Image (cartoon, rainbow, N blue to C red):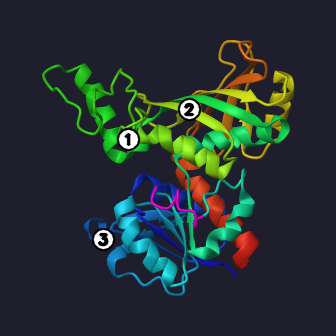
Amino acid sequence: MGYRIVVVGATGNVGREMLNILAEREFPVDEIAALASRNSLGSEVSFGDKTLKTKDLDTFDFTGWDMALFAIGSDATKIYAPKAAKAGCVVIDNSSLYRYDVGVPLIVPEVNPEAVMGYARKNIIANPNCSTAQMVVALKPLHDRARIKRVVVSTYQSVSGAGKEGMDELWNQTKSIYNPTDSKPPRKFTKQIAFNVIPHIDVFLDSGETKEEWKMVAETKKILDPKIKVTATCVRVPVFVGHSEAINIEFEDFLDEDEARDILRESPGIMVIDKREDGGYITPVECVGDYATYVSRIRQDSTIDNGINLWCVSDNLRKGAALNAVQIAELLGNRVLKKG
């Protein structure tokens, strides 16, 4: 016996990935519904070898459905997620709306699976920010061994994190570089993204950090440990898919780089590719379509007593969004609903 699953926002980048991953991982589905706004009503999306026609989110009745994977913005989620939850359908939400709600668990299954039991308070589970998700997967096993005091992270985030508009802007601007008569000024981003990097993701806060940077701080504390100090600089780069992070970690206790490498190799969700030679590391292009969070460039930081540096890369549409949501659904099914 399987589950009745709803994918909300099925025509978007993340919604399509959710459908792909549900099929790839052979999630036990008895029935599946693909929902979209009226603008996309009737559009077709793939689910394994099946083709689904999208249904109208506005009129859909969530009664009798087990789980709904939401991949729409916070404004729409604010309207429809409570309706689904009230109807008895557990919401797994990819937006930022519920991430900081104390009554809603924020989950990365490799890091805090026990938090799933908190779903019952509001019948909602939150999916973290894409840049946070991959980082805490890498931090968790090291934190268990040596206790992390402080993290300094610089992110190199792909344009797919800004949705289809971001991907289109990079594509169109790149073409226009070779055709000066067809100029493509910035629309989605604040400056030209083609052949450039932009140290600005989301809005600026009074502190001087951006909201994306604040998210990494707040979410790491909620998911992993409130005592960890985190400072982040988040940068948009001209890469279509795949987020990269340069992470500096300060521990309470000494951790040798070789032991850190061994720990990460044995940890769930992580693939270590770390050879000290040309090409002995992973870049975003190589991680696209994969489930793993890749870790490379593991080395001691000689400027502090207990420091490690590492390079972390992951497909942001997968682990940073759709895959993590499906893993939460698997966790919920295995530990709570137990139908499959």
Residue drawn 48% across and 37% down? 213
Please state if 94 lies on the left or on the right of 221 as rendered.
left
Please tell me whether residue 16 belongs to the stretch shown in magenta: no
Could you say whether the residue bearing mark 2 is in a helix, strand or loop?
A: strand
Could you say whether the residue bearing mark 1 is in a helix, strand or loop?
A: loop
Whether pointer 3 and pointer 2 mark residues with C-beta atoms closer than 8 Å, the reply is: no
Question: In the rendered view of the protein, which quadrant contains the N terminus?
Answer: bottom right
Which tag is nearer the camera, tag 3 or tag 1? 1
Task: Kindly report the distance in space between the C-alpha atoms of the residues bearing marks 3 and 2.
Answer: 42 Å
From the image, tell me which residue sits under label 2. 231
Q: Say whether disc 3 or disc 2 marks the residue closer to the N-terminus.
A: 3
Name which quarter of the figure residue 124 lies in.
Answer: bottom right
Task: Kindly report the distance in space between the C-alpha atoms of the residues bearing marks 1 and 2.
Answer: 16 Å
Please tell me whether residue 99 belongs to the stretch shown in magenta: yes
From the image, tell me which residue sits under label 1. 202
Q: Which amino acid does label 1 sit on?
A: Asp
Report whether residue 56 is seen.
no
From the image, tell me which residue sits under label 3. 41
Picture disc at residue 137: none
Whether pointer 3 and pointer 1 mark residues with C-beta atoms closer than 8 Å, the reply is: no
| Residue 82 spot, x, y in % from top left | 45, 76
| Count of number-bearing discs | 3
Which tag is nearer the camera, tag 3 or tag 2? 2
